[in-house]
Each structure stands twice: as C-alpha cells, then as structure tokens.
Amino acid sequence: MSSFTHFVFLAGLWGMLTLNLAAQTLPNTWMQEWNTPSAQNRPLQIIHGSYYRGKPTPEEGMETLVERGLGGVVINVPFSDQYLQNEDEWKRFVHAVRAADEKGLRYWIYDEKGYPSLAAGGLVLKEDPKREAKELVYDAKTGEFTVRPCFEYTHASNNYDGIQRYPSLVNPEAGAAFIRLTHDAYYQHLPKELFSKVEAFFTDEPSTNALGMGPMSEAMRKRVKVYDPVDLTKPNLPMVVWEDDFPEIYKKRYGGDLNAVRKSLFTGDTDADKAVRQNFWQMVACRCCEAYYTPIRDWCRAHGTLASGHTLAEEGLLLHIPLDGDKLEVLKKFDLPGLDFLSSVPEKAMDRGWQAVLFPVSAMVLNGGRRVMCEISDHDFRIAEKGPAPVAFMQASAAWQQAAGVTEFTLYYNPGDRTVAEYRAYCEHVGRVNALLRDAKPVYTTVMYYPIRQCQAEFFPSARRSWESQSNALQTMSNSYADLGKRLVKNQTPFFMVGDADLERVLSGESAAGKIMEFVVPQGVTFSPEQEKILAAFEAAGGRVLRGEVRPTPVLEPACDMVFYGKFVREGWTFHMLVNLTDKPYSGKCLAVPASGALELNPLDGSVVPAKTIVEIPGYQTRILAVPGK
C-alpha cells in the first residue's frame, strides 16, 4: 500500500470513527445538566412553615435542603391561629423566602392552611357564612328535596388535615374572596424582586365537596383536628352540588326548569332523565372553571406566575362527576396541571396509578404545554406503619411518572427519615431524567376517549362512596375505560385522553400532539352523528378506531407488562425510557431502538455508554436509550 493510499485509508477510518462518535454524543449542555442537574430539574420540598429544619436560622435551614439535593421549596406563611393575619409571621415568611432565594432554591407558594384549598384557613366563611358549599339531597322514602350545607359525610369532614366547613367551589364570591385573602396578600407582602421569582401557586384538592363518603371512622376522628362539630344525626342522603342560581343558569343554558326536573338528578332511566343529568354536570364543570380555576389562572398570569396544584381524586373515572363535573376540562385551566400520588410502590403504576398521572398529562398535551406536577409521598408506607419507603422505590415511582410526562415533583417525604446521601441520590435521579426530558416532547400515536359526558348521563349520586348502585351501562363504560388504559400501559403504548371538546382537533392532527394513528374507545360508548363524521374522516386519513380493544405494537422482546415505557423527541434525538417496576431484573431487546448508534443512560449512577442489543434493567431501575435522528 502506497503512503498516499495508506493516508487516505487512515483518513477515511478516522472520519468514520469521528462520525460514529459524533452520532453517539449528546450535546455538551445536556451532558453538563445530566452530570450536575441544576435547581430547575430537581424536586421541591413542601416545607409549609418549617423554615428552620432544626437549625437556628432560615438560611441554615435552607442550606440543609440544598445539601440533600433539592432544587426548591413549596412554602407558605405559618399555619397558626392567626393565619394570614399576623404581620410578624409575614415577616418570618419573607425572611424564609429570601433565604431560599439566596441559596439558589426556586420556590412555589402553597395557597391554603392545610387542605382542601378555598377556605383560607376559615376566613372565607368567617367573612360571609353564606358562601358555604351547598348540597341538594333527595329522600326517596319521603320524596322530599332539601337544600342544606354540604359538610357532614363529605371530604370536608373526612380528611387527614382537619374537619372544617367548606366554601362553595361554584360560588364566584367565594373564589374571589379566597384570591383576595391569599394571593393578593402574598403579592402585597413579598418584595417585588422576590415575588417576581415565584414560579407557581399551588392549590390543593379543591372540589365541589358533594361526594357521599359516609361518616368518618372513630379512630380517624381522634387523629384529626376538629374545627367545626359534625352532626351525625343529620340524615345521610344522596347529594349533588347546589348553588342558589343554578336554576337560572340551567334555564339560560338549556331552556328548561331545573326545579321541575330535579328528580332526574337522582333517579330515572329515560332519555329525558339522562339529558337532565348530562346538562347538569356539564353546567357544574363550567361553573367550577368560571368561579375558581379560571380566576386563579388569570390572576397568576397577570402577576407573572403560574397556576398549579391538583384536584381531588384524579384516579377513578366516576369520582370526576360529583367532584368536578368534568375533570379534564377543569385540569385544562391550570398552567401547570398536577396530581397527588400518596404511594411510593412502583407497581401501583399498573393498577390505578396511571389514571391519576395521565389526567394532568392529558391536560398538558391538550393545552400544548410541557410541565406537569406531582405531589408525592410515602403515605401508604406510613399509614401501614412500614416506615419510610426505600430510596429505590422512590426513584422508580418518580421515574415511571417522568416516562408518562411528569416534570415537577413536590415532596412530602421527610428528609430526616433518610441519610443526606440517600435523599441526594433520589433528587439527582429525578434531576438527571429531567435534564434530558423536561425540554423534550412526548411522542404519542394513540389517544383514548374520555367518556365523561355519557357517564354524566348515567350517573346517580350515592350516600356512600359506592358504585354498585350505578347502571350497567355506566359500569360497563367505567370498567372498560380502566381495563383498556391498563392494557395500553402494560403494552408500552404511550397515550393520552381526549374528551368531546377537543375530539375533532386531536383526531385531525391539529393539536400539539401531532398526528394520531389510533383512537381507543371504551365499550358502551356511542357517538352523535356529527362525531361519527369526525371518526369517519379520521379513518379515511389512515387512522384506526378501536372500539373496546387495543392492538399492541411490540416494544420489548421478550414482552414484559411490568416495564413502563415513554417516548420523547428533542432536537434531533429520540429518547426511549424504560422503568422496571418490580424487584425482578429485566433482560431483553427494545425493538424501537436500532442495533447500533444508540446510547444507554443510567440515571442511578449517571453513566452513559453505547447501547447494547440486549438492555439489562435491574429491579426498580431505569434506563434511557438515546437514538440520534428522528
């Protein structure tokens, strides 16, 4: 071989090696963030008024959070008997926020004294008791209707924080008073340079409250602070949320006399009965948005911050009706929609966990956003007296939610229950995944129908949280919905939900999700002629409508229904995220990844290596496979 030929050969070989190396190298800025995640990608600790963390000053207290790897705090003025009304407490709060800011922590504001939000620690009702939540109840034995305060046998008298009368979520005066007493107060007390850095306001579990839960157990009642006495001699009857102007609003929207047909809210199976129920619950959903969620979002936007938090009981389709009317429409009013997940058992993702997570994720997708919040804890471990959850469980529980689309984690874990190194390892695991995916776009080709309007038509309120009395049609839709969603998750099919309001936009490919190829419809669902035309156009464009079934596209070989999968794209890279939800190791191929040219990233130790044909995922661990090119 001549020297020239030898030179050309070496130059070509070097070129191929350089090209291959370049193809397998993520951008430097991404890798810097992966190696040392910044505050924006790390979790936030919910600290409420615990500014000191056992230290003599807030500065030292915040430093302990930085040492544990946290990126921020969810903070509020102290929960005292003078909540929102003590200037010394406001000064301590401002001091704590300044300390967090100086330590490089980001911060959100928690908008209530405990939960559920809207009471402002009781001040909303103290100003005007007529703002209290109301319920319309029906006694089938006597045929009598009664409008009365909505308190006994509801979430307001059945929660772990405190038993207290609750304002009406569908009363605009209550919502306006809450914003004035809380949001305005924070804006007035925080110096402008600090308020300008408030990322979000966190609202916690507001609802119509009109869900029959029965009486609280004696054991639980002894553990909870009682602000208002509970009258258990009050008849426990089926209820719906009520406000004095509902008949007027109903008449304007639907042209009928609500008082004349109110029995249909509780009984009856004619088409006319069902139309009343569907109209009523759609009216409730609109009113929830108009009276509470939209005003808070508008206030936040006007003041340069975001509306976030979560509603009550994201999991469970039938709970959405009495608590929100239409939860997906409510969640779309958040700038940064969220959920709470009181479990750190990774396997629960495949149970009902996916339902809780995918509702705010769906709202995010429909809004064209990216960020989703989860308030997470190991409450289930503690209530069972099993101690704190293992760090591996915590990491996997966050990872599968990140694979589903969650980006922000607000923590009710107790940092003192774990070593500094353990807590830091958890926070860095979250941060590394976010380093790649927080600015990436989730990829979907499948969407599932959220049959809330047809469920509204079939729904009967109950005196207890029991669904056995619901119609066969409703149970069919609800059970099919849960089954199909679980099967999609177990088959590694990323998807989101769509309701009637966005159906045409999503199926036509005009939403932020892009082109959809499969539309999954629960059993028992029927569509109007207009909607059938939308489905026909979708099929004519190459889409598939799957009624009561799913068609899995294999992602793993061998198949494994306990690996959670998410797919994302970002600036010429595709990310395939695999989370092992069990203690059993998985070994196999990811069929979505080419045989060569990909990277395998491990958020547990930060390693980045060329991906092998076989991916090995130990129990409760995560792997991200990065593929250059779209």
Image (spheres, grey):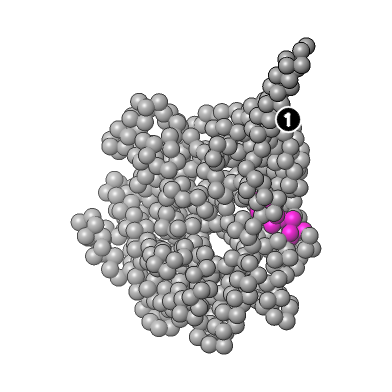
| Rendered position, 109 above or below 181 | above
Q: What's drawn in magenta, residue-wise?
A: 422-432
Dominant secondary-structure state across the stretch colored magenta? helix
Residue 444 on image: x %, y %: 50, 38
Q: Please tell me which residue is depicted at 56% across the width and 74% down the height of the picture.
A: 76
Q: Is residue 217 visible?
A: no
Q: Quadrant where the C terminus lies?
A: top right
Q: Quadrant of residue 265?
A: bottom left
Secondary structure of the residue carrying numbered label 1: loop
Q: Quadrant of residue 599?
A: top right
Left or right: where 304 falls relative to 99: left
The residue wearing badge 1 is 612
Q: Amino acid at mark 1?
A: Lys
Residue 367 on image: x %, y %: 42, 50
Q: Please tell me which residue is depicted at 40% across the width and 42% down the height of the picture.
A: 511
The residue sitting at the top extreme is 1
Q: Please tell me which residue is depicted at 74% across the width and 59% down the height of the picture.
A: 424
| Rendered position, 363 above or below 81 | above
Q: How many marks?
A: 1
